[in-house]
Image (cartoon, grey):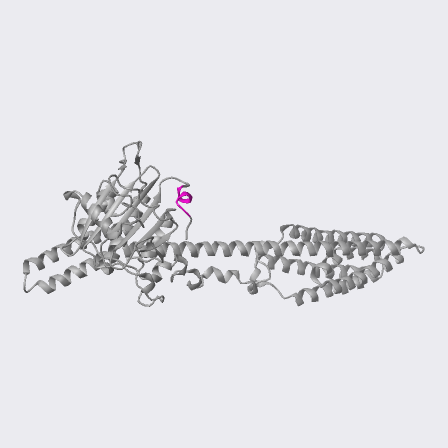
């Protein structure tokens, strides 16, 4: 049924432990010898079965579960090593959104403050442009160049506005993003028209301020610095043309302001780019984490469903198959016995149907819902799984408080999740007993203490020597022990397995009933 690696002291038995020290599972029983009730003591699995069988009252006795021994690969198998591990899951649709090569930066990583700065730049352009035009018309109302200047000013305004409009459209429609070359051509056209306009009307020189900002935004740093230098030269020439005499401040002032503004802008742009990259990485990481969590949740649910099916429907189908095969063999020689097998299979079908319906609705196991608690559910399981070849005995120790009863000294109230998990573990273990152990008797012993619950599943089957079993997973089937390990770990409990060839097998599950008990029971192995 189960497999282990460490020989038990003094008897050649083999024990496999999952997070428990030997003997941590079941307390000694009153009146028993020094080794009674302790896995790994001198008393082997067969003696455990005989002791439990002697304690069982007639009304607690049923006849026959199913034998069980798992392959060694199952004992060493961890949930993350099954076919449900994430690296075997297919790509998710949302992963396509996380590929860096699909976009430079995610839209969420864009800096909203940069949009306001761009808006201020555009407003500054039109304010300076309009002010320069009004000033020129006021000072040169009848100049031969007035009409030309007005036309060039209008052309510059329309040209600049076209770029602003295209940027706004692109911001609202990212799919219509224009190539960078178009923006460079647009900037070059604006600068050329502006340069001609400054040559005719030097008052338009200060329109270079928003143009400098546009150059720094659109062009690479080196090209932007070159264009800023050209624009600064035009501004200096225009200021000298407006001045009646040479003034050094007219030359140094624009150059110093342009150089300082360029240095500050490039520095801030590098910081902003770094911030955008960090935000972009953070957004991608959060999306990847969310996708990973969704995958993990899906895999966990798949594993839960597979264990539920293994411990309920698959076990019932296996029992039905055995009963129907027995009925077929005895139909001609003993029709009454064959009909009994068919009736037993029919009862199992009805129970499986009830389990399937509750399983679909994610309700508690049918045995728990129809009985007064875990002990009654275990007895119902034993009665259902017993036959003339294998009998299942149930024994309970301690006092388990009822749903309307306050737990007192020496009593324990098992949470619904603990009861459901222990029942599923018993179902899975009995399925293994039926399939592998060739046992004639199996005993389920439930012990409830104030801080923990202990479930022993013992059988008098053939047992096994793990060292003699193949180390390859060939021939391994079902979930078996790995599913039991997963269920125990989900409750923070421990699992101990004791077996020896020809001496049966004992499985001990210890589950804490209070937070913090899991650490006291021993570390996971």
- Please say whether residue 256 is visible from this viewpoint: yes
- Quarter where residue 71 is shown: bottom left
Q: In the rendered picture of this protein, how many numbered marks are placed on residues?
A: 0
Residues 94 and 163: in front is: 94
Q: Where's residue 88, x and y in %?
A: 42, 64
- Find residue 30 and report its horizontal and vertical position in percent: 25, 39
- Quadrant in which residue 178 is drawn: bottom right
Closer to the camera in the image, 140 or 123: 123
Residue name at image x 30 percent, y 61 percent: 465
Which residue lies at the image location 37% right of the left edge and 47% below the top edge? 493
Asked if the stretch drawn in magenta spans residue 32, the answer is no
Pick the residue in front: 233 or 78.
78
Tell whether 115 sits left or right of 16: right
Q: Where residue 423 appears, x then y in whole percent?
A: 27, 48
Instruction: Please report the bounds of the magenta region as a residue range.
Output: 517-522
Q: Main SS type for the magenta part?
A: helix
Residue 166 in the image: x percent, y percent?
Answer: 63, 60
**Left or right of residue 298: residue 437:** left
Q: Is residue 67 left or right of residue 156?
A: left
């Amino acid at each position: 049924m189960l497999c282990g690696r460490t020989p038990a002291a003094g008897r050649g038995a083999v024990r496999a432990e999952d997070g428990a020290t030997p003997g941590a599972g079941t307390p000694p029983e009153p009146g028993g010898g020094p080794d009674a009730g302790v896995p790994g003591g001198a008393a082997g699995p067969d003696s455990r079965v005989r002791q439990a069988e002697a304690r069982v009252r007639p009304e607690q006795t049923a006849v026959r579960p199913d034998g069980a021994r798992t392959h060694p690969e199952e004992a060493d198998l961890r949930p993350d090593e099954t076919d449900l591990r994430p690296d075997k899951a297919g790509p998710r649709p949302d992963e396509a959104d996380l590929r860096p090569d699909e976009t430079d930066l995610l839209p969420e990583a864009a800096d909203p403050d940069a949009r306001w700065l761009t808006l201020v730049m555009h407003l500054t352009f039109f304010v300076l442009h309009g002010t320069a035009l009004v000033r020129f018309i006021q000072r040169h109302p009848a100049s031969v160049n007035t009409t030309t200047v007005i036309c060039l000013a209008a052309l510059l305004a329309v040209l600049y506005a076209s770029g602003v409009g295209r940027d706004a459209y692109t911001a609202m429609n990212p799919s219509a993003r224009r190539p960078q070359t178009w923006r460079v051509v647009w900037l070059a056209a604006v600068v050329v028209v502006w340069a001609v306009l400054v040559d005719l009307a030097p008052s338009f020189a200060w329109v270079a301020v928003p143009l400098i900002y546009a150059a720094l935004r659109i062009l690479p740093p080196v090209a932007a610095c070159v264009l800023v230098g050209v624009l600064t030269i035009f501004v200096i020439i225009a200021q000298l043309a407006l001045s009646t005499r040479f003034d050094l401040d007219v030359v140094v002032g624009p150059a110093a302001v342009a150089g300082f503004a360029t240095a500050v802008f490039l520095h801030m742009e590098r910081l902003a780019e770094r911030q955008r990259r960090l935000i972009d990485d953070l957004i991608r990481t959060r999306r990847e984490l969310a996708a990973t969590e969704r995958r993990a949740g899906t895999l966990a649910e798949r594993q839960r469903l597979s264990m539920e099916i293994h411990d309920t429907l698959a076990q019932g189908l296996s029992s039905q198959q055995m009963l129907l095969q027995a009925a077929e063999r005895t139909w001609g020689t003993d029709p009454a016995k064959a009909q009994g097998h068919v009736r037993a299979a029919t009862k199992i079908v009805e129970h499986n149907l009830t389990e399937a319906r509750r399983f679909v609705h994610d309700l508690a196991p049918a045995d728990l819902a129809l009985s007064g608690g875990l002990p009654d559910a275990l007895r119902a399981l034993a009665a259902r799984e017993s036959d003339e070849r294998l009998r299942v005995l149930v024994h309970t120790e301690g006092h388990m408080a009822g749903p309307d009863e306050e737990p007192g000294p020496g009593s324990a109230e098992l949470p619904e999740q603990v009861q459901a998990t222990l029942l599923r573990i018993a179902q899975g273990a009995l399925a293994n007993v039926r399939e592998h152990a060739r046992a004639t008797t199996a005993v389920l012993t439930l012990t409830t203490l104030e801080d923990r619950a202990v479930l022993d599943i013992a059988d008098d089957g053939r047992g096994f020597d793990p060292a003699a079993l193949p180390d390859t997973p060939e021939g391994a089937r079902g979930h078996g022990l790995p599913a039991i390990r997963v269920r125990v770990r989900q409750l923070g409990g421990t699992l101990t397995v004791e077996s020896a060839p020809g001496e049966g097998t004992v499985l001990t599950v210890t589950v804490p009933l209070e937070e913090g008990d899991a650490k006291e029971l021993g570390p996971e192995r």
